[in-house]
Image (cartoon, rainbow, N blue to C red):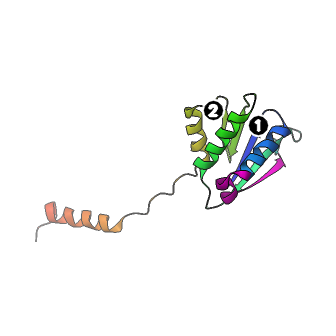
Amino acid sequence: MRIDVAVSGGEAELRSLRDWLSRDPGARRGAHVELVQAEPSPGQMGVVTDVLQLITDNAWSAASFALALSTWRQTRPHARRITVRRGDLTVSLDGGGDEELRRLLDVLEPPAAPEPPDRDRDREQDQDGRADGGEGR
């Protein structure tokens, strides 16, 4: 999974965040973090800013990343707007409150795969249906 993080304040802030994440054991274990040029949005002529790109694997913990991001933000002398994008989903963090962290987790967590049908449960329901009101013998 690929996640892009933009921070108001420019490249220095992104480098600070990258360094912070490189010291975080959860981020080090579950994501490859690098500074890259952002892809232009539709209608833009070129690169506007740099982003921090995280490529995650199965060891990824969205909650650990959200906590590391929130903690880093609290160390900054000025409030910074942080924009996190995963695919078509984007969330902007302005205040760092609990609601923003919930929205961030909603963007970061991949959708849960549908559970496979429980064939034993379906079979029991079929048998119950025949036994209770099924056709007579």
At label 1, the amino acid type is Val
> What residue is disc 2 on?
96
Q: Where is residue 84 in the image (x, y as percent from the top left)?
A: 69, 41
- Across and down, in percent, residue 126 comes to 25, 65
Q: Secondary structure under badge 2?
A: loop
Q: How crowded is mark 2: few (under 14 residues within 10 Å), some or many (20 or more)?
A: some
Which amino acid, by three-letter code, is at mark 2?
Gly
The answer to whether 94 is drawn above or below residue 90 in the figure is: above
* Residue 73 sits above or below residue 34 on the image: above
Q: In whole angstroms, how far apart are the C-alphas of marks 1 and 2?
A: 13 Å
Q: Is 55 left, or right, of 114 in this rendering?
A: right
Among the two numbered marks 1 and 2 on one chain, the one whose residue lies closer to the N terminus: 1
- The part of the chain drawn in magenta is 23-37
Q: Nearer the viewer, residue 32 or 109?
A: 32
- Element assignment for label 1: strand
Q: Is residue 135 left or right of residue 95?
A: left
Q: Mark 1 points at which residue?
A: 7
Q: Quadrant of the N terminus?
A: bottom right
Q: Which residue is drawn at 86% across and 38% down?
A: 48
Residue at 62% across, 56% down: 60
- Find out whether residue 38 is within the magenta segment: no
Q: Is residue 48 left or right of residue 112?
A: right
